[in-house]
Image: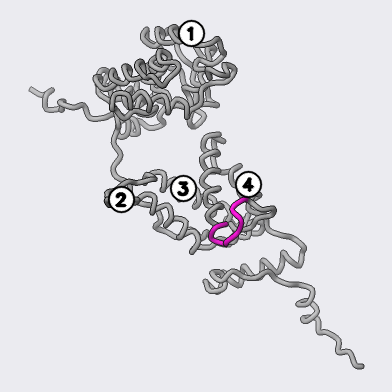
Amino acid sequence: MTITPLSPLEGTLQQWEPPPIPSHIAAGDEAVFIAQALEWRRRTLAGKETQNDRQLVEGWLGDCTPTSSVETVKTYRRHIERLRLFLRQWNEAPLREQPDERFLAPGDPEAIDAFAGSLRNLVHATDEQGSPRPQMSVSTYNVIVAAISSFYKWCSQPNRRGFTGVPLSPVPSGLQLKKAARKAKALSHEQLHQVYFGARQCRTSPSRSRDELIVRLLYLLGTRATETANLRWDDLVQLETGPALHVRAETAKGKKERFIALGQPAIDVLDALRLVQPASAWILPNLRRPDRHVSRQGLWKLCRRAGEQVGVKFWTHCARHTHATHAYAITKDPKLIQNTLGHSDVSTTLSLYVDETAGDSSSKYLE
């Protein structure tokens, strides 16, 4: 029997079995297809593989925020995991993560577009009568889309394409939804005192007197929920100008520490808090575990519960907006409020946090 020797090309083809090329890559731009096919061939012959989905996500999360914000990383992780769950459904795979899962790369524009469409359905959801009843806000939708876009931009950078297997970002352009003009959402003095009353009268809360004090503290300090939850008693310091509260860099947004000078009302609230809660290093400890501080979600639920008691929509950041609006009405000093709130730009303070004062106008101050 005569054996025909293989040609060098045929021998190479027998040794190398390229992975199947996704249809959207094969049908796309010719230059991209050729570059991707050659890259796959080179890495396969070298015995190398691209990273799996879990490795890609962890690598991106390590670079996604220049300030290494814990809250930002948690939020981005939640959004990318939402996409991964959708991709498993899209590929008819088990919903639980499988070992060495690979659905994120090279990136399927059709799947990404369908994912965005599923989110838009939540934004534009209606009730049985056809009235708008959104299950997701436009802002949340845009944040999720921005996170997914950030992930694929990271993966498709020239220095990463080789190990991510993402030649170009598959996120279609124009996915962001137009947001309505943002306005400050501050309460009037009357509404604020109603919320105080709601916190004090809430029968479903085991610590009503403490709840009212926390709402008052959020208003008087103007701090963010995460900053407030992480306050310690040793953050109270005595400066040359008087008592102040140190917002540490590791808890402040953008890692920018600041000192908030305290007036007598805030000091009185802090003194009262010591009397109605267990001893702890935290200014706002968890009542069941005093060695831990109250959670950001716990503060949000407390504020919402207090507002619902009196029919006022109230949440932690609303206290911050209300602080800014009331302080500006008295001081007319935007730089002072900017420094207290910890904003990088005074335009943020004035355009987003200071609400128009009802019944007031610049005309009333002219003669």
Q: Which residue is mark 3?
A: 144
164 up-or-down from 267: above or below: below
- Tell me where residue 69 sits by quadrant: top right
Q: Which circle, 2 or 1, is nearer the viewer?
A: 2
Question: Within 10 angstroms of label 3, few (less than 14), some, or many (20 or more) residues?
Answer: many
Magenta: predominant secondary structure element? Answer: loop
Total tally of numbered discs in the picture: 4
Q: Amino acid at mark 2?
A: Glu
Is tag 1's residue or tag 4's residue first in the polypeptide sequence?
4
Q: Which residue corresponds to the image point at 70% horizontal and 69% vertical from the top-left?
A: 41
Whether residue 137 is in magenta: the answer is no
Please say if the residues under marks 3 and 4 sit with CB atoms less than 8 Å apart: no
Q: Which residue corresponds to the image point at 29% horizontal and 45% vertical from the top-left?
A: 180
Q: For marks 2 and 4, give the CA distance.
A: 44 Å
Looking at this view, name the residue that lies furthest to the right. Answer: 1
Q: Amino acid at mark 4?
A: Gly
Residue 126 left/right relative to 146: left
Image location of residue 346, percent across then percent down: 35, 30
Q: Amino acid at mark 1?
A: Arg
Q: Which residue is mark 4?
A: 59
Is tag 3's residue or tag 1's residue first in the polypeptide sequence?
3
Please say if the residues under marks 1 and 4 sit with CB atoms less than 8 Å apart: no
Looking at the rendered structure, the secondary structure element under dot 3 is: helix
Magenta stretch bounds: 88-96
9 up-or-down from 318: above or below: below
